Amino acid sequence: MSKTVTVGPRTRVGVAAALALALSVPCTALAAPLAPAGERSAGCPTPGKEPGIGHVPLFTDAGVALYAGGDYTADGGTAEAEGLLVVGGHATFAKTAGGVFNVGRVGAGSGILPASGELMLAVGGDLGIAKGTTVDVGHGLTAGPRYGGSVRVGGKIDEKGSLTTNGGSLSSGTGAREALGPYAAFGGTVRRESASLAALRPTGTSVRSGGTVTFEGRGAAAPQVFEISAGDIDGASTFLFRSLPEGAAVVINVKGGQAVGISPLSVGINGDRVDTYDSPRFGEAASRILYNFEESASIRLGGGGNFMGLILAPEADADLTASTNGRLYAGGDIRTHGAGNESHNYPWVGSSVFGCEPTPEGPGGGAPQPEPSRPAPSPSRPGGGGATPAQPAEPAPTPVASTATPSPSEPTPVPSTTPPAGGKRDGSLATTGGQTAPYLLAAAALGVPGGVFLLVPRRRRVRR
């Protein structure tokens, strides 16, 4: 039974003087050296201590970061996809102005990614790379004994641009089953887990008021479960979580099959804003939250903000111009085409099925001992830590634009003592998009005096 209460008419979200001030901050691109891949831990981050956005690979993870049951298309000015990308259909990389699209290792991300030389891109169908576009897989992972990132393609490779594996293996023409391997049935896993999570009883309430949805926790249940209709989350941009027990995983079950459009602008947990890159809770927040769109046929993440949390959408196509921080599993097609938007790999702490999967042996075999990891709960009954609800110490965060430092770009690879055996290489990662740039574009396009209004696009095409 839904616990959602709708308050007031659905409106566009207005952001006035604070956002106008934020838009005056220049988008600065920084550079930083890469750490040798062999210095990574072979394990996973301790729950609650997930890293924020940075340059350095920190942990190894063999889990699926991005899954498209249909086709995957990266065009426009989109920048990168961290972690393992699995595509059931065809994959197309065609950046409008050309340039680099990073896969596996990215310029700035969670630092949670596959070990050097491991699979980072699996495509069941064909792989197409447009002229002027470079797909750079496993960039800078040169600590050995293996290098870069591996690519498997079931169909043919149409390489009008460039595919760089940095020493990783490359195969094509093997058929979908061989290319996808153990991930050929991943779509079924997504559907089963989505249905299981959807059956959980709510432990708290959700309230929609204007463009803001507030999720109010109750008690010490883990996970914290909320329910909201697709109609009530459609058009929202600010998400506030209150009275959440410390460390508890969060499940948001979105009910109904209508198309959903969200332009993420601000996320707060227990009074702290967590969606800016300078937030000390950024990684923790991205790893705690899961949105379960069990029946939705279409999901659009518009604008240029940070969407926080894992997305389960077994029946949906996904259209992205915002950056995602958390895994994304769509049963249909995924198109990413924003201005420098990125997909960052934050595994979910609520279930071993979608959690971090540590590599048995770190890159080079000489990695430090892993941090302790949590016991794995039952796949269909997610769990979380903590027992005492934490009340907000101050009012919920105001939805203003981020003034945090944008994603750094073009780190310098660390040279290895042994050159990679095979695979093309170049000297830089793609320039990653700063999160203030989309706001500048929105302000210029809309030209609203005294404030900026982010329009929420709605995608109504239904595909079944």
Image: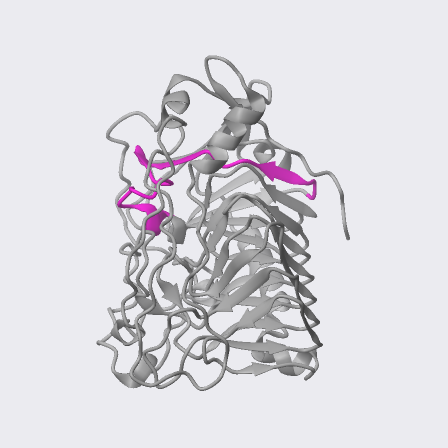
User: Which residue occupies the foreground of this view, 436 or 373?
Assistant: 436
The answer to whether 158 is drawn above or below residue 33 in the figure is below
In the picture provided, is 367 more to the left or to the right than 311?
Answer: left
Whether residue 199 appears in this view of the structure is no
Height in image: 415 above or below 328? below
Residues drawn in magenta = 257-285
Q: Is residue 245 above or below residue 403?
A: below
**Residue lying at the far top of the rendered structure:** 450
Q: Residue 12: where, in percent of width, then height?
A: 56, 23
Residue that appears at 44% across and 38% down: 204
Q: Is residue 250 magenta?
A: no
**Place of residue 246 in the rendered image (x, y in percent of width and height, measured from the top left):** 28, 46
Q: Is residue 40 visible?
A: yes
- Which residue is at a point 44% across and 73% down the rendered structure image? 62
User: Viewer-proximal residue, 440 or 320?
Assistant: 440
Give the side of residue 152 with respect to residue 357, left or right. right
How is the structure coloured here? one colour
Q: Quadrant of residue 396?
A: top left
* Residue nearest the observer in this picture, 446 or 288: 446
Residue 231 spot, x, y in % from top left: 64, 33
**68 vs 252, nearest the viewer:** 68
Q: Does 258 lie within the magenta span?
A: yes
Report the quarter where the N terminus lies: top right
Rendering quarter of residue 9: top right
Query: Where residue 184 appears, x then y in whole percent?
Result: 63, 75
Residue shown at 36%/46% (left/top)?
Answer: 29
Numbered label tally = 0
